[in-house]
Amino acid sequence: MMCIILLLINLTSCVCGVSKPYDTPLKYQAEENSDVTVEWSFSSETDIPLPSLKIHCQKVLGLKVFYHLDNCIEESQHEQFAGRVQCDKDALRGGRVRLHLSRVKMNDSGVYLCRMATDFGRKVKVFSLSITAVDKPKPVTPTPAPVTPTPAPVSRGRISLCVVLGLAAAAVLVLLAVLAVRRCSLKSCRTMKMCSVAHQ
């Protein structure tokens, strides 16, 4: 609460004697990680000596220094904005403030208050930044390749059954062969007996 009161007192002292201290607040919108340039006119003069110019911009919530220029010297900023804010000095000479903020972040969203003072007078400008999150593309799911049917693996039970049937078939063949040989030998024996009987 005390900070707000001090801010109001400070603002009042900055705009005393100025006929139009506030213009319509500017609104800027950008996507996260993009760049944004905020700009406005602060003087109708077209050849402003920079040593006479003072600019102090801060984010209202937290009173973080966004940009500070004092007699051509850029003063330190809050670490949130350090190295990301650049000022167009040529625009300043023409009575315009043009501040370029790079790689905007979600926490850059908010209301900003800028006070400017020259030999020609003072002015206050308010602008707001609204940063939106980047829509991340949905991951592409690869289309599965057509599956060629593979023969089902033969189970051990089937292999065992085949082996047993094969052995049984072989045993039957062996048995048949033995029987056939025995029958032949019996026939040949009978024939031989008949022959020997006939010879006697």
Image (cartoon, rainbow, N blue to C red):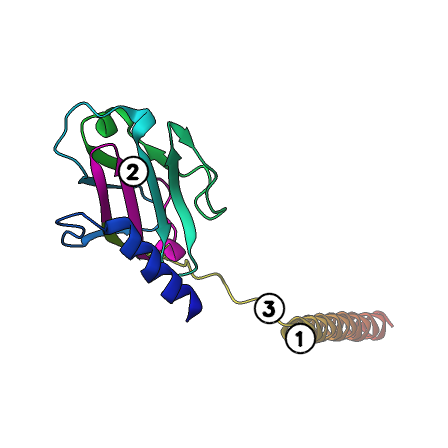
- Position of 40 with respect to 66 (left or right) is left
Q: Where is residue 171 in the image (x, y as percent from the top left)?
A: 74, 73
Residue 165 is labelled as 1
Q: Which residue is drawn at 43% across and 60% down?
A: 62
- Position of 128 with respect to 173 (left or right) is left
Q: Quadrant of residue 168?
A: bottom right
Distance of mark 3 from mark 2, alpha carbons? 75 Å
Q: Which callout, 1 or 2, points at the residue further toward the start of the chain?
A: 2
Q: Which callout, 1 or 3, points at the residue further toward the start of the chain?
A: 3
Q: Nearer the viewer, mark 1 or mark 2?
A: 2
Q: From which residue to which does the magenta span run?
A: 100-124
Placement of the C terminus among the 4 image quadrants:
bottom right
Are dots 3 and 2 in contact, CB under 8 Å? no
Q: Assign the magenta stretch its main secondary structure.
A: strand
- Position of 173 with respect to 49 (left or right) is right
Pick the front one: 79 or 5: 5
